[in-house]
Image (tube, rainbow, N blue to C red):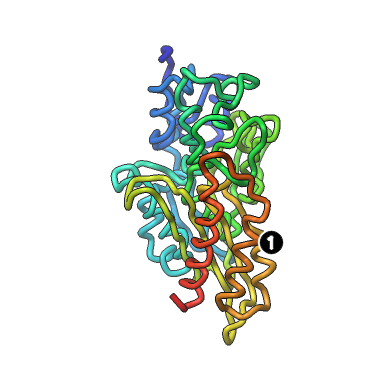
Amino acid sequence: MQPFSYKKAGQADNAVALVAPDAEASYLAGGTSLIDLMKLNVQTPRELVDINPLPLTKIEMQDNGVRIGAMARNSDVAYDAMIQKRYPVLSEALLSGASPQLRNMATVGGNLLQRTRCYYFRDTAFPCNKRVPGSGCPAIEGYNRIHAILGGSDRCIATHPSDMAVAMVALDAVVQTRGPNGERSIPLVDFHLVPGNTPEKETVLQHGELIVAVDLPASPFAARSHYLKVRDRASYAFAMTSVAAALDMQNGIIRAARIALGGVGTKPWRAYEAEKLLVNKPANQATFQAAANAAVATAKPQKYNGFKVELAKRTIVRALFTVGGMA
């Protein structure tokens, strides 16, 4: 790991001013992802700007929803009474991820920016288009059991690892940022990028642009929501498939729906076609199965991850039964 300098920033504008001019500078928040990647020589920033002193830890009720500061710790958000009541899917997603120790350190902003757990990305002995553009993607012909079946390209099939982001995508979250060119509001569904020809570009953020908050709008379906995660072991493991599901129901008829998938996409995956099939339909097995089929209709499985297609369908159906009160 190359030598680097370390600075602290007390204000958001000061932090941006320190990072933006230097292409080899990075923000340091909880450090639960970045420090690991530095140890592996996957990321080698020359300068770290510590943003822990920034006053961005509040979870605040607003007229049109809730604002969560980017430096709020995952554990604080998961156990917040307002979040548990109004957005249970988010609390459940956070509690299904990592360990209590990591959740106590990891931040909301950092969680959105965590990078893939693809074996080839994290091992510098292998080529990887995310690390070195144009070097190749050994996962496509290699061992790809954990990799994406949705949103991949011939350059990359790595999955996005976040549980929290999947829940937030289902909740229509909006990311608030501050950067060299001012402030932006970015719908989370548009925040992460599919790899296409540029897998090294994972988000729409400019260099030096800082996440300052995430807004969760009030909605008729958020309180009736659930996060279901399927993984190789019961704790401290990343999703093979996961589903964030939310329904607004009246007399057994679905009036609005949100479905987002994790563990199967190159970004937190919003299942729009599945949502369309649910609206104005009865909450029953046939409706849920049709939605599940639509959610993975464009899947492109690889040699070792074809099982994810059926697993994702079953996970969607089970999550919808739970949310629909029929589990």
Q: Residue at x 50, y 56 (%)?
A: 311
- Farthest-out residue, left: 101
Q: Secondary structure at mark 1?
A: helix
Q: Residues within 10 Å of mark 1 (few under 14, many from 20)?
A: some
- Farthest-out residue, top: 3
- Residue nearer the viewer, 1 or 265: 265
Q: Residue 75's x, y, as percent?
A: 35, 51
Quadrant of the frame with the C terminus: bottom left
**Image vertical order of residue 197 relative to residue 263, above or below:** above
**Image vertical order of residue 184 relative to residue 261, above or below:** above
- Does residue 167 show up? no
- Does residue 311 show up? yes
Q: Residue 110's x, y, as percent?
A: 47, 40
**Image vertical order of residue 175 relative to residue 129, above or below:** below
- Residue nearer the viewer, 303 or 324: 303
- Farthest-out residue, bottom: 251
Q: Residue at x 41, y 12 (%)?
A: 3
Q: Amino acid at mark 1?
A: Glu
Q: Residue at x 59, y 37 (%)?
A: 157
Q: Quadrant of residue 152?
A: top right
Q: Is residue 314 left or right of residue 100?
A: right
Q: Residue 248's x, y, as percent?
A: 58, 75
Give the residue pinned by disc 1: 273
Q: Is residue 263 left or right of residue 20?
A: left
Q: Is residue 116 left or right of residue 39?
A: right
- Residue nearer the viewer, 211 or 41: 41
- Residue nearer the viewer, 277 or 205: 277
Q: Residue 302's x, y, as percent?
A: 58, 40
